[in-house]
Image: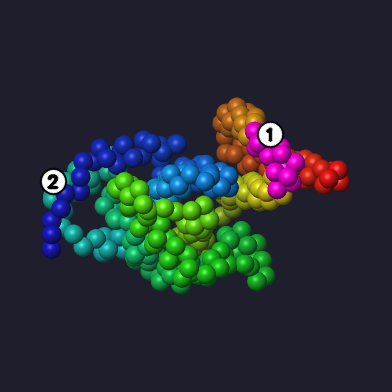
């Protein structure tokens, strides 16, 4: 059995310091912000292969933050999970390093394990979560449903993962390509926009599915929380954005025929900038747990109004063709 160093304790403090709120229990904010920005790149369908490389590398980086933050959350939830985490560690560590960690002054037990746990493959994801939750994660994610559907006892809820084998296969390829793009020039390795989108969606689906599993295991006894309100608000925003994206695809198709596609893209970018600036400088500046869901509701409404505006413009443009 090999002995390895845990590493400088400063490393984990540095990682935590780069989180938006400097704490792992708000890790979702960091992951969602990154994935939201990447989704904008994916939806704009850039033709430059370098954009696609960036999306793959950044998606896996966001996934790694989510995975490590999830490990911290699970392990620090109780003794049961700490015991499972201890059993999952097979390496020997130098006593000097271990004592520095176990002081508990700079890192929690969960952070210690998450810092040492590998996160470079689908096997790593399945193995660690399966051990901590005492389940077969492949089966668990296949059965995962939206936590709100479970909480509201929706009849025959739609599963979050339509095809588990396909999702895991794409996740594996995302890890493979991420390693290539992050460590090699590899100018002849290309990835087109459609496949880039599939890999991105595989990462997104995995994150949502794991969250669904957590709400049936670690979080199952939690009461109605601010997070649930925030989740609902984010879901409303994502639903509204999907509707807007669909409307924009139709509008751009007509605009290309009319020669006004460039103008429409510029106008839409300006609209997004104005709406984002409003959200960032109004509700986002207010202190208190009630404001994030209020901000989300306001943003979703603004997106829905824009969707109607774009749809009405398209419909009227069609009449004039």
Point out the tag, 2 or 1, that comes first from the N-terminus.
Answer: 2
Q: Nearer the viewer, residue 156 or 196?
A: 196
Instruction: Residue 38: give x, y in percent of width and height.
Output: 50, 45
Q: Main secondary structure of the magenta part?
A: helix
The C terminus: image quadrant: top right
Instruction: Residue 284: give x, y in percent of width and height.
Output: 58, 32
The residue located at (32%, 50%) in the rendering is 186
Task: Give yes or no for residue 264 being in the magenta stretch.
Answer: yes
Judge from the rendering whether residue 259 lies leftward or rightward of residue 20; answer left or right.
Answer: right
- Mark 1 — residue? 263
What is the C-alpha distance between the residues marked 2 and 1?
63 Å
Q: Nearer the viewer, residue 32 or 98?
A: 32
Residue 219 numbered mark, or none: none
The residue located at (56%, 64%) in the rendering is 160
Are there few (<14), some (14-19), or many (20+) residues within 10 Å of tag 1? few
The residue located at (30%, 60%) in the rendering is 85
Are there few (<14), some (14-19), or many (20+) residues within 10 Å of tag 2? few
Question: In this orientation, does residue 278 appear?
Answer: yes
The N terminus: image quadrant: bottom left
The residue located at (20%, 48%) in the rendering is 6
Residue 96 numbered mark, or none: 2
Task: Give yes or no for residue 183 being in the magenta stretch.
Answer: no
SS at mark 1? Answer: helix
> Quadrant location of residue 290?
top right
Residue interval drawn in magenta: 253-268
Instruction: Residue 96: give x, y in percent of width and height.
Output: 13, 46
> Quadrant location of residue 125?
bottom left
141 shown above or below 239 = below
130 shown above or below 267 = below
């Amino acid at each position: 059995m090999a002995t390895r160093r845990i590493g400088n304790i400063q490393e984990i403090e540095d990682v935590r310091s780069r989180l938006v709120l400097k704490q792992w229990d708000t890790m979702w904010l960091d992951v969602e912000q990154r994935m939201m920005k990447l989704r904008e790149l994916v939806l704009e369908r850039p033709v430059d292969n370098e954009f696609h490389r960036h999306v793959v590398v950044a998606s896996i980086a966001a996934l790694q933050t989510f995975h490590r933050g999830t490990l911290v959350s699970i392990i620090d939830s109780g003794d049961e999970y700490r015991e499972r985490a201890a059993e999952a560690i097979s390496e020997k560590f130098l006593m000097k390093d271990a004592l520095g960690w176990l002081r508990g002054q700079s890192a929690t037990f969960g952070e210690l394990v998450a810092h040492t746990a590998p996160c470079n493959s689908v096997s790593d994801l399945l193995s660690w979560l399966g051990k901590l939750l005492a389940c077969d994660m492949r089966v668990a994610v296949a059965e995962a449903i939206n936590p709100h559907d479970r909480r509201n006892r929706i009849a025959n809820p739609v599963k979050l993962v339509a095809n588990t084998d396909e999702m895991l296969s794409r996740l594996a390829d995302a890890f493979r390509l991420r390693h290539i793009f992050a460590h090699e020039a590899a100018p002849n390795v290309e990835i087109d926009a459609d496949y880039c989108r599939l890999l991105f969606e595989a990462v997104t689906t995995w994150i949502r599915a794991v969250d669904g599993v957590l709400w049936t295991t670690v979080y199952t006894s939690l009461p109605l929380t601010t997070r649930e309100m925030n989740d609902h608000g984010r879901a409303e925003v994502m639903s509204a954005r999907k509707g807007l994206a669909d409307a924009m695809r139709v509008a751009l198709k007509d605009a290309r025929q009319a020669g006004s596609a460039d103008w429409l893209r510029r106008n839409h970018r300006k609209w997004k900038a104005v709406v984002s600036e409003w959200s960032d400088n109004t509700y986002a500046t207010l202190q208190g747990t009630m404001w994030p869901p209020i901000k989300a509701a306001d943003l979703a409404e603004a997106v829905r109004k824009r969707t109607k505006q774009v749809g009405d413009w398209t419909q009227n443009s069609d009449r004039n063709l």
